[in-house]
Amino acid sequence: MSPLEVRGLRKRYGELEVVCGVDLEIAAGECFGLLGPNGAGKTTTLKLCLGLIDPDAGEIRLLGNEVPARARQARARVGVVPQFDSLDPDFSVAENLVVYGRYFGLKDREIEPRIPLLLAFAGLAGRAGAKIQTLSGGMKRRLTLARALVNDPQLLFMDEPTTGLDPQARHLIWERLRQLTLEGRTLLLTTHFMEEAERLCARVAIMDHGRIIVQGSPRELIARHIESQVVEVHGPGIEAWSARAASLALRTERAGETIFCYASDVEPVLATLRGQAELVYLHRPANLEDVFLKLTGRDLRD
């Protein structure tokens, strides 16, 4: 049985339909990424799947339960890492875990033996008595992840779990999320970090304007939708160089003062750059971010 199945999901606010016929199915034990620009409908989709808001149309089965009819029963076996931390500053680290566990009907005697394990998992061993105000941003985010595990969930919903973290904290959380999938838990992740999705997710769906536009593994999407090599070029003289590069019949995109050249063989591009001391360039393999920008555009979303 799939932990989450969604068919024909729709949600409208006034004249604006923010989720437009979404279909999703997540396999047990996989990390699935839901990607999209701001306003694409990702967070609304998560709220619908959790039964926090009611859909206008569609079917949702969460851990075998129909949502929203049996959303409360389903959420008893789900962990949630929200986009913004909601830790209680009046309680200590351990008290935050105990109070959260009570929301699931757990007794203190059930929660307390788990606290050392959860804090060790989050890299917070020895911090049980610390007040929330004394924790760094990375510590708070890791505590929020530990809190989501209090009820020993089968499925975790994580809305941008590493936003605002430094590289060290982000890598630690990545390692912990890999550990959870090795334990057999299922993860549904939204993120704006394409590197994060490429590293962690077995499959991803890219969402835009309320619709799923592609689904597949990161490697499949890169192979299917983008040329294999990229050269990024910027610097004085870029205009004259770009006219020359266009004659090579490449696919190029421009973002500000940077030109992105996409091709299976970029040697002709690199040849035009040799000896051009005023131009700065980077040659790299294509990645998931290239796919994302090709499919959703480079325009800023607010």
Image (cartoon, rainbow, N blue to C red):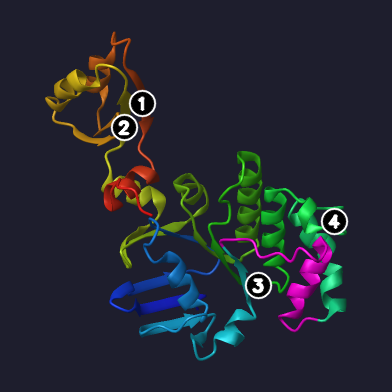
Amino acid type at mark 4: Ala
- The residue that disc 2 covers is 230
Give the left or right position of residue 135, taking residue 36 as reference: right
Residue at position x 61%, y 54% in the image: 178
- The residue that disc 4 covers is 130
Give the left or right position of residue 106, taking residue 84 as reference: right
* Local SS, label 3: loop
Dots 2 and 3: beta carbons under 8 Å? no
Amino acid type at mark 1: His
- The residue that disc 3 covers is 153
What's the CA distance linking mark 2 and mark 4?
48 Å
Amino acid type at mark 2: Val
- The residue that disc 1 covers is 283
Dots 1 and 2: beta carbons under 8 Å? yes
**Camera-nearest label, 4 or 1:** 4
Task: Determine crowd level at label 4: few under 14, some 14-19, many 20+ residues with C-alpha closer than 10 A.
Answer: some
Q: Earlier in the sequence, mark 2 or mark 4?
A: 4
Residue 86 sits in which quadrant?
A: bottom right
Q: Position of residue 168 (x, y in %)?
A: 65, 40
Residue at position x 73%, y 54% in the image: 122
User: Relative to 139, is 190 above or below?
Assistant: below
Front-most of 8 and 100? 100
Q: Position of residue 219 (x, y in %)?
A: 39, 48
Give the left or right position of residue 37, taking residue 190 as reference: left
Q: Earlier in the sequence, mark 1 or mark 2?
A: 2
Question: Looking at the rendering, in which quadrant would you find the C terminus?
Answer: bottom left
Magenta stretch in the rendered image: 83-106
What's the CA distance linking mark 2 and mark 3?
41 Å
Residue 171 sits in which quadrant?
A: top right
